[in-house]
Image (cartoon, rainbow, N blue to C red):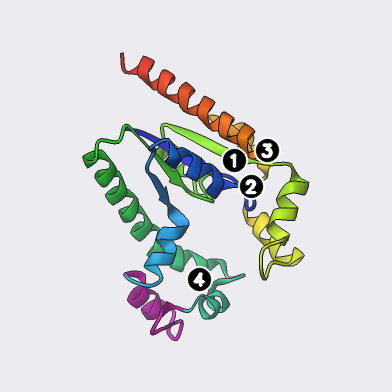
Amino acid sequence: MIRLGLTGSIGMGKSTVGAMFEAHGCPLHDADAAVHALYRSAAVPLIEAEFPGTTGPDGVDRAKLSKHVIGKPEAMKRLEAIIHPLVRDRELAFYQRAEDAGADMVLIDIPLLFETGAEDRFDAVVVVSAPEDVQRARVLAREGMTEEKFEAIKAKQIPDADKRQKADYVVDTGLPLEETRAQVDEILDQIKSRFAQTRE
């Protein structure tokens, strides 16, 4: 089973491109969605034990947790030590379900794929990219987003140009939707052809 990583900086269109892969029958696992689910389930008692007072009846209170970890590298490492293994377990369970269902290719959406050194876990990495002005307009249109928040998020992510350089495949989402979809179709054809040759 071919394992593809999907990544890209904030506002680049990962969700849109991920849905295009799914439309081709490629199962998708979203690491961010896994974290959100864990914040309402398995991670709650572990986070409460490490950061008392940061959870409630609905799970982890992200605002309270943020006060404990934002700008505090050591605290962030302690949080990551709780979350990363749980997310990895979910990813492995996803692989097993996909394999049992007979999938020949899966896609894992990881926003900080290169930043966390996860590229070695994949057969190929797809990077979603768009011009900076398009990215900025998309992100600042989000509810509650400010220039300061946007810049803080960008500061944690390696530059788009570096991601494009590291990628096996790049999808440009600064184009009309149909052209983006055509790029995904072409990438899927290339991947299937490439891995068919390596397995012969």
- Closer to the eye: label 3 or 2: 3
Which residue matches tag 4?
75
Q: Residue at x 39, y 38 (%)?
A: 26
Which residue matches tag 3?
176
| Amino acid identity at mark 4 | Ala
Mark closer to the chain start, 1 or 2:
2
Mark closer to the chain start, 3 or 1:
1
- Closer to the eye: label 1 or 4: 1
Answer whether labels 4 and 2 touch (C-beta < 8 Å): no
Q: Which residues are magenta?
A: 42-60
Q: Position of residue 136 (x, y in %)?
A: 74, 53
- Closer to the eye: label 4 or 3: 3
Outermost residue to the left = 100
Q: Position of residue 174 (x, y in %)?
A: 70, 40
Mark linked to residue 157: none
Q: Position of residue 168 (x, y in %)?
A: 53, 29
